[in-house]
């Protein structure tokens, strides 16, 4: 983090296994950008507590998530890959930023509305202030760029507003971060209900592909994907959501443009199309799956990454926090 590259920050919740949506919408872009930026990639375990988790599962999912970052190709020696809960500065800054966030802003968050509808019996305050903790994650490290999927756009806009409001009141402290949302696959859709986002919390496992699904499971899920009855392989999100989703997925794994994909499949049927999509996804994820298996055997290496990166993140976080506390008038700790 000592070079003068710009800073990139992103994270994912350890609430289960990663899906193709997480991969194409976010992780794949992290891979593209990791050399150009100084990057921090967090496992946002504090965010996961907004929905009840089994403690043993959360611990396991957090570690598996961190290993999937590395298995996907994130270099943990060059980037800071760490657990959010290992850096207490996140929660501290979130408190201060809570005092710079309006209730009306949080009330407008569509993710809060969706999650409260889904978890009616546990609409806790953490769920409501979730976006403030996310703003704290980002602002703590003077982040320039935040690569996320489309569903996080609103949270990013709020983080920008909070940063500007704080700066207007206290002088320039925070960098106002820019979102990075790719044009293709920023919103990977459910394979079963292609007008809905692919989500790891979907009750139907055929709706999503997990990065660690076996190749034959991947092929079968794509074979069963819901499409339409007009038998034309054409990109048209409004009228052909299922086919368009598969075209986007195919384009991400092959590097072909949408037009190239369309001409490649001209005159072919849905059966052939789905088979090829299944093949490129299964093959495309194979290296990640192999590296993941290797990492599982290497406990000490992962432990050491977690420790070292947590320390670096803490050091950087404290620098920002000291500045913020001073600006708002909190007394300095005399040693
Ligand atoms: P989470 O864990 O829900 O999602 C992780 C990332 O995956 C993207 N994503 C998708 N992209 C395309 N299509 C989909 N179907 C799809 N589903 C998920 C999300 O947009 C996200 O980029 N609040 C964040 C975690 C977070 C964070 C941060 C991100 C906490 N602090 C600071 C960036 C910076 C979230 O819900 O992640």
Image: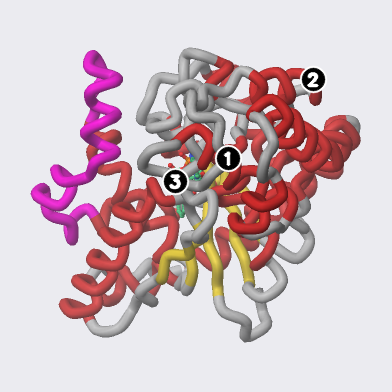
Q: Quadrant of residue 93?
A: bottom left
Residue 236 numbered tag: 3
Marks 2 and 3: CB-CB under 8 Å? Answer: no
Residue at image position (22%, 71%) is 166
**Range shown magenta:** 98-124
Task: Indicate yes or no: mark 3 CB to ligand 1 under 8 Å.
Answer: no
Mark sitting earlier along the chain (1/2): 2
Q: Is residue 48 visible?
A: yes
Q: How many marks?
A: 3
Location of mark 1 (residue)? 233
Location of mark 2 (residue)? 216
Q: Quadrant of the N terminus?
A: bottom right
Q: What whole-number distance in Å separates the C-alpha atoms at marks 1 and 2? A: 23 Å
Residue at image position (35%, 59%) is 156
Mark sitting earlier along the chain (2/3): 2
Instruction: Choose between 66 and 243: the one closer to the eye.
Output: 243
Q: Is residue 133 left or right of residue 74?
A: left
């Amino acid at each position: 983090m000592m070079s003068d590259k710009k800073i990139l920050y992103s994270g994912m919740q350890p609430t289960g296994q990663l899906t193709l949506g997480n991969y194409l919408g976010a992780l794949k872009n992290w891979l593209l950008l990791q050399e150009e930026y100084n990057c921090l990639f967090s496992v946002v375990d504090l965010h996961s507590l907004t929905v009840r988790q089994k403690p043993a599962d959360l611990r396991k999912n957090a570690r598996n998530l961190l290993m999937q970052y590395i298995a996907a190709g994130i270099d943990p020696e060059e980037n800071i890959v760490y657990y959010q809960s290992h850096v207490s500065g996140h929660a501290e800054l979130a408190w201060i930023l809570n005092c710079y966030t309006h209730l009306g802003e949080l009330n407008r968050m569509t993710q809060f509305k969706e999650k409260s509808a889904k978890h009616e019996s546990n609409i806790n305050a953490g769920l409501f202030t979730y976006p403030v903790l996310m703003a704290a994650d980002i602002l703590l490290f003077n982040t320039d760029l935040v690569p996320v999927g489309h569903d996080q756009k609103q949270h990013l806009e709020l983080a920008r507003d909070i940063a500007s409001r704080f700066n207007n009141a206290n002088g320039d402290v925070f960098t106002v971060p820019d979102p990075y949302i790719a044009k293709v696959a920023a919103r990977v859709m459910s394979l079963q209900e292609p007008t809905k986002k692919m989500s790891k919390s979907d009750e139907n496992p055929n709706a999503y592909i997990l990065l660690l699904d076996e190749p034959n499971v991947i092929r079968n899920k794509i074979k069963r994907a819901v499409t339409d009855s007009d038998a034309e392989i054409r990109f048209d999100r409004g009228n052909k959501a299922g086919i368009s989703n598969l075209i986007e997925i195919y384009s991400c794994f092959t590097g072909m443009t949408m037009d190239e994909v369309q001409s490649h499949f001209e005159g072919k049927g849905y059966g052939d199309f789905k088979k090829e999509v299944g093949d490129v996804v299964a093959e495309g994820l194979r290296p990640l799956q192999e590296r993941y298996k290797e990492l599982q055997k290497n406990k000490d290496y992962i432990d050491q990454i977690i420790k070292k990166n947590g320390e670096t993140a803490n050091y950087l976080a404290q620098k920002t926090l000291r500045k913020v506390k001073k600006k708002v008038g909190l007394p300095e700790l005399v040693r």
